């Protein structure tokens, strides 16, 4: 890695190639380089794209654009996208572009990547199995990645295999197996987990198989890797696991394969092996290979699986005899015309995916790049669909479906039906005959208006129901049931006793019965009511998407409803929620007295939005609190005009102790964010944002904080502090700041705080030595500290501070003391604008301008890259100081010469 990092610093090296056989760890290496390059701030931007064996310029362009924050690329113009990328990269002084897994030469200009004489600041790092490919790409330096040493191999093998390999009976054989992996990480990772929880005979068998497949020459190394992965496949314990492994090979290379908890990827070497195994099981796999026509092979009769997803196939044969076919994947081919008789010869088919285009899998990582697609082509449902009597899974997502949907109701064995994001306006009555259906997905069916009464209640085996944010036309309980076209009633869901997942939107609380029970729900997203400008389900859906891997239970309440009148089953779900959004809900003053006094202990993310009668989140003066909210990590309070404080009175032990992020926006009655009685409950706080709180006078009040002997650091976890538009705030830190430690603080932003006179008080973190602290009690509930005189002057630590931005602070007189500056070793960006009263950016520790009794002192900012100032910033940094700045970029002035010297001397 050292050679590669040095190459990227070399101005004469624009392209660096990394080569090595498949599975040796090239992708892992470049991801670590990407991470280190970001941490070391070597580049303004770092972008990465996977090229793959069948490269798609469009896919590469979108991936790079995502990393660079380039939005709204034109859909159908490759050269226009290349031009936009070219210009965006040239805007950056230093850019690293990583192109992973090249199999042949690609033209960087066609992608839109300038380098060399076009942009000397753009470094390209590429990986390939072939050194020849690196040479074809004109790499100036090529680094070959070798295999692990014997010791490294055993260490990794032991890590993945677990402590059982230390067993005296197993250890010698396990070491043989580790040696048999040939130092290849991919082989170690797959083999190491394969014989888990098995006896010494299984380990001996694995060692023998590895010996028998050992390579005899260098050319045999690829086959060597394949044999190791095949062996791990053979050790999968169930046929179901093996089947899933083969099915994963049906997806394109580097595809985010969806699973319940998120996504997984399949290594290209593992995918190759899986495809070889699948082909032996009569699978035809040509996913994302640029096909425009149906593949031409001698016969389809023996095939058990076909994957042609992510191609450009428009037509399929009129008829196809595939009597053994069990899985057919045709999604992401659009427009796709299916002849009426196409399915007649597939009576054994169990899985069928005819979904439309959902863009590239990486849209999940960069959703802001992808505006809603224009209406997709019409898709005519063929009548031969009714021949698929053994079908278990049918996916028709992202389609404008024409034809008779009632055909689907004839598929009595169907277990999974996905119509998400499709233009379906009405669910046929025949869907009620899908008696084996376990999953129904109607997510995003925005024009869905009718689900006939009685259809849902007949789906007695349904386990998962997703219909948010689509269906909103539930029938009121009081409405007549005589009309055969009447809509579903919410009470029908009560008949679905097997439901474990429920995602629904209920526009009005009046439609909900009082005697529902959802005791078996393990996953839910239930939105009751709407916001003025958007559906509430969209609002909470943002949080669910963001925290999908961690949270599965979310609720949102809105509208002008009385919380105290909520049905008991709703309250029970509220208390089990991990995400809760209360938006535009009135008639309650605090969350405990009106919802529960002994719940919310699963809550991780809480949003309070426009609840204008809420004064407090908690009120311990009104009653003894049993609620702890000890799992809460993110508290978001916005546009609550009567909100006074987070807790009125003392918090119970542990309450709110895990909050890592706090956002308070537009709360006009708050005077303090964290008063003294709350300070120690927020010691895990990492990010704080306060904005547009008109009456706020201070953020942290630490005047009467009770400091325990073993706990003498406050806010040591704080990483980011953002304060915007606080017109009356006079203090960020109110009180004695000697116990405040900001050693993990990385970013500070203060804007439009006209009454603020200082950001970092001179006493910040200057804690006297422990033996000089003399506690005395002034009041019964507070310990005050006074200190004896000390000759030492501890240096406050800002060692992790990277960025400081100060705008529009009309009374700010200075920013740092000289002792603070000594610890700013990582400061990269300092920007101070529109601060007319600023006298000195750096003030000496005595509060006097300049440095006393010294002709010249040197202050060093070794990591500084950006120093920005505005027209009103004209004073010196500090009298008598020579300022030494490391690598920098000057903003706000034409050149770093004359005007800079005038600022510093």
Image: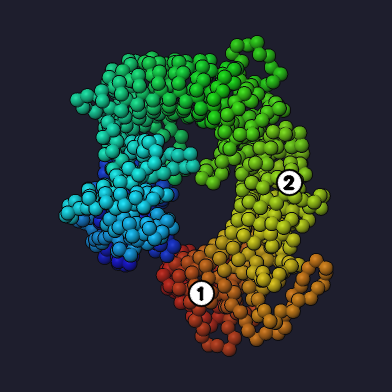
Indicate the position of residue 71 as horizontal and vertical percent values.
43, 44
Question: Closer to the observer: label 1 or label 2?
Answer: 2
Relative to 655, does residue 530 appear above or below in the rendering? above
Residue 284 shown left or right of residue 358 in the figure? left
Q: Can residue 83 be seen in this view?
A: no
Q: Residue at x 17, y 54 (%)?
A: 216
- Rendered location of residue 618, percent (x, y): 74, 50
Disc 1 is placed on an element classified as: helix
Q: Residue at x 49, y 42 (%)?
A: 261
For label 1, count other residues whose C-alpha is less than 10 Å away and answer few (under 14), some (14-19) or many (20+). some
Please tell me whether residue 479 is drawn above or below residue 900 in the rendered image.
above
Cα separation, mark 1 vs mark 2, equals 60 Å
Identify the mark nearer the N-term, 1 or 2.
2
x and y percentages locating residue 517 in the rendered image: 66, 30
The residue that appears at 31% across and 29% down in the rendered structure is: 305
**Where is residue 348, by image quadrant?**
top left
For the residues labelled 1 and 2, say whether their Cβ atoms are less than 8 Å apart.
no
Instruction: Identify the disc placed on residue 598.
Output: 2
Q: Label 2: how many residues lie within 10 Å, few (<14), some (14-19) or many (20+)?
A: few
Where residue 327 sits, quadrant-wise, is: top left
Q: Label 1 belongs to which residue?
A: 903
The residue lying toward the viewer, choosing from 882 and 413, is: 413
Q: Which of 612 and 437 is in front in this view?
A: 437
């Amino acid at each position: 890695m050292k050679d590669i990092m040095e190459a990227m610093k070399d101005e004469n090296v624009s392209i660096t190639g990394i080569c090595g056989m498949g599975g040796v760890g090239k992708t892992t290496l470049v991801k670590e380089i990407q991470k280190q390059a970001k941490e070391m701030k070597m580049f303004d931007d770092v972008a990465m794209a996977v090229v793959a064996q069948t490269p798609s310029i469009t896919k590469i362009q979108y991936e790079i654009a995502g990393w660079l924050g380039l939005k709204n690329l034109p859909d159908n113009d490759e050269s226009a996208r290349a031009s936009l990328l070219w210009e965006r990269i040239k805007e950056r002084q230093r850019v690293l572009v990583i192109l992973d897994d090249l199999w042949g030469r690609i033209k960087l200009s066609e992608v839109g990547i300038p380098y060399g004489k076009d942009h000397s600041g753009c470094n390209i790092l590429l990986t390939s199995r072939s050194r020849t490919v690196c040479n074809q790409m004109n790499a100036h330096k090529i680094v070959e990645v070798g295999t692990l040493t014997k010791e490294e191999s055993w260490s990794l093998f032991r890590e993945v295999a677990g402590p059982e390999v230390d067993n005296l009976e197993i250890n010698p054989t396990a070491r043989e197996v580790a040696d048999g992996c040939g130092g290849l990480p991919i082989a170690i990772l797959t083999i190491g987990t394969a014989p888990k929880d098995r006896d010494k005979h299984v380990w001996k068998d694995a060692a023998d198989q590895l010996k028998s497949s050992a390579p005899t020459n260098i050319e045999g190394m690829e086959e060597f890797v394949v044999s190791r992965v095949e062996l791990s496949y053979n050790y999968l314990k169930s046929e179901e696991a093996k089947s899933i492994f083969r099915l994963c090979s049906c997806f394109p290379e580097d595809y985010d394969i969806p699973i319940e908890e998120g996504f997984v990827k399949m290594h290209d070497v593992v995918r190759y092996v899986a495809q070889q195994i699948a082909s032996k099981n009569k699978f035809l796999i040509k996913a994302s290979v640029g096909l425009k026509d149906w593949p031409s092979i001698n016969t389809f009769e023996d095939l058990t699986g076909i994957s042609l997803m992510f191609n450009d196939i428009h037509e399929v044969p009129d008829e196809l005899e595939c009597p053994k076919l069990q899985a057919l994947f045709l999604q992401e081919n659009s427009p796709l015309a299916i002849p009426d008789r196409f399915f007649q010869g597939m009576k054994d088919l169990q899985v069928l995916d005819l979904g439309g285009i959902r863009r590239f899998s990486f849209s999940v990582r960069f959703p802001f790049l992808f505006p809603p697609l224009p209406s997709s082509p019409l898709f005519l449902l063929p009548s031969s669909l009714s021949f698929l009597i053994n079908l278990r899974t049918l996916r028709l997502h992202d389609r404008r479906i024409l034809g008779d949907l009632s055909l689907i109701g004839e598929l009595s064995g169907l277990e999974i039906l996905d119509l998400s994001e499709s233009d379906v306006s009405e669910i046929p009555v025949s869907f009620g005959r899908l008696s084996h259906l376990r999953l129904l997905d109607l997510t995003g069916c925005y024009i869905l208006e009718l689900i006939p009464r009685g259809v849902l209640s007949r789906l007695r085996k349904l386990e998962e129901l997703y219909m948010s944010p689509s269906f909103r036309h539930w029938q009121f309980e009081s409405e007549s049931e005589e009309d055969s076209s009447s809509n579903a009633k919410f009470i029908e869901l009560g008949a679905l006793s097997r439901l474990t997942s429920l995602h629904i939107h209920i526009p009005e609380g009046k439609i909900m019965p009082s005697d529902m029970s959802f005791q078996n729900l393990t996953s839910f997203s239930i939105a009751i009511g709407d916001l003025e400008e958007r559906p509430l389900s969209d609002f909470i859906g943002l949080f669910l998407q963001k925290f999908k891997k961690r949270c599965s239970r979310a609720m949102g309440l809105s509208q002008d409803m009385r919380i105290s009148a909520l049905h008991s089953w709703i309250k029970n779900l509220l208390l089990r929620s991990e995400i809760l959004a209360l938006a535009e809900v009135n008639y309650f003053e605090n969350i405990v007295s009106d919802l529960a006094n002994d719940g919310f202990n699963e809550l991780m993310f809480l949003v309070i939005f426009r609840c204008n009668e809420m004064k407090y989140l908690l009120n311990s003066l009104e009653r003894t609190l049993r609620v702890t909210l000890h799992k809460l990590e993110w508290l978001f309070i916005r546009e609550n005009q009567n909100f006074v404080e987070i807790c009125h009175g003392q918090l119970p032990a542990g309450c709110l102790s895990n909050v890592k992020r706090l956002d308070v926006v537009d709360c006009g009655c708050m005077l303090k964010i964290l008063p003294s009685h709350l300070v120690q409950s927020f010691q895990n706080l990492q990010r704080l944002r306060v904005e547009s709180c008109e009456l706020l006078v201070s953020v942290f009040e630490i005047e009467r904080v009770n400091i325990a002997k073993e706990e003498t650091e406050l806010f040591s976890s704080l990483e980011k502090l953002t304060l915007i538009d606080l017109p009356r705030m006079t203090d960020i830190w109110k009180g004695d700041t000697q116990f405040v430690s900001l050693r993990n603080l990385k970013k500070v932003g203060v804007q439009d705080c006209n009454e603020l006179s200082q950001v970092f008080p001179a006493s910040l973190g200057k804690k006297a030595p422990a033996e000089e602290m003399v506690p005395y009690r002034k009041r019964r509930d507070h310990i005050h500290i006074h200190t004896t005189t000390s000759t030492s002057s501890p240096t406050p630590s800002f060692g992790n501070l990277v960025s400081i931005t100060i705008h529009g602070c009309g009374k700010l007189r200075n920013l740092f003391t000289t002792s603070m500056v000594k610890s700013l070793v990582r400061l990269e960006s300092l920007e101070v604008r529109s601060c007319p009263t600023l006298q000195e950016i750096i003030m000496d520790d005595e509060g006097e301008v300049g440095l006393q009794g010294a002709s010249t002192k040197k202050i060093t900012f070794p990591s500084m890259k950006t120093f920005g100032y505005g027209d009103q910033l004209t004073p010196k940094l500090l009298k008598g100081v020579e300022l030494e700045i490391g690598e920098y970029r000057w903003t706000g002035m034409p050149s770093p010469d004359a005007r800079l010297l005038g600022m510093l001397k």
